Image (tube, helix red, strand yellow):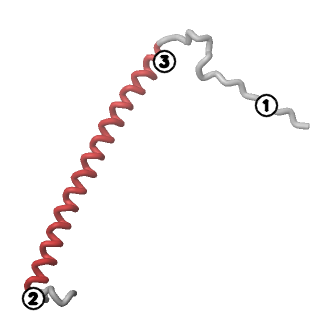
Amino acid sequence: MSDEEPEKSAAELKEIRLNRKLAQTAEGIKAMADIAAADAAIRKRTAHLRELRLAKEAADRDKPAESGGKAGSKKSSKRKST
């Protein structure tokens, strides 16, 4: 501490610590609310994407393969052993 600042009494120090703790508690509550909101947004977006994927899979399953098997057909290459 510098010479110009008066020393704080025990009651003042206790009040400073209490105020700091209250501020930290409020900040923690806000952070948890932000995390919960982000989690809810992620769950909502995931559910929407799942619905889109399931609808696309159902549509692909219902229509016959028009492209001649272009999608999803891979030839397996086998190596000859020497």
Q: Regarding mark 1 in the picture, which secondary structure is present there?
A: loop
Q: Regarding mark 2 in the picture, which secondary structure is present there?
A: loop
Give the mark nearer the N terminus: 3 vs 1.
Answer: 3
Give the mark nearer the N terminus: 3 vs 2.
Answer: 2
What amino acid is labelled 2 in the image? Ser
50 left or right, relative to 77: left
Q: Which residue is drawn at 12% across and 82% down?
A: 14
Q: Regarding mark 3 in the picture, which secondary structure is present there?
A: helix
Q: Mark 1 points at which residue?
A: 78
Residue 69 versus residue 4 in the image, above or below: above
Q: Name the residue under label 3.
A: 61
Q: Where is residue 5 in the image (x, y as percent from the top left)?
A: 15, 85
What amino acid is labelled 1 in the image? Lys
Q: Which mark is residue 45?
A: none
Q: Which residue is drawn at 13% across and 89% down?
A: 7
Q: Position of residue 71 (x, y in %)?
A: 59, 20
Residue 17 versus residue 8 in the image, above or below: above
Which quadrant is the C terminus positioned in?
top right
5 left or right, relative to 68: left
Q: Name the residue under label 2.
A: 9
Which quadrant is the N terminus positioned in?
bottom left
- The residue at the far right in this view is 82
Residue 80 versus residue 33 in the image, above or below: above
What amino acid is labelled 3 in the image? Arg
Give the mark nearer the N terminus: 2 vs 1.
Answer: 2
Q: Spatial distance from mark 3 to mark 1, Cα to Cα?
A: 30 Å
Q: Quadrant of residue 80?
A: top right
Q: Where is residue 37 in the image (x, y as percent from the top left)?
A: 25, 46
- Foreground tag (3 vs 2): 2
Front residue of this view, candidates 12 and 21 = 12
Q: For the residue carrying disc 2, how many other residues have a C-alpha within 10 Å: few (<14), some (14-19), or many (20+)?
A: few
Q: Where is residue 39 in the image (x, y as percent from the top left)?
A: 30, 46
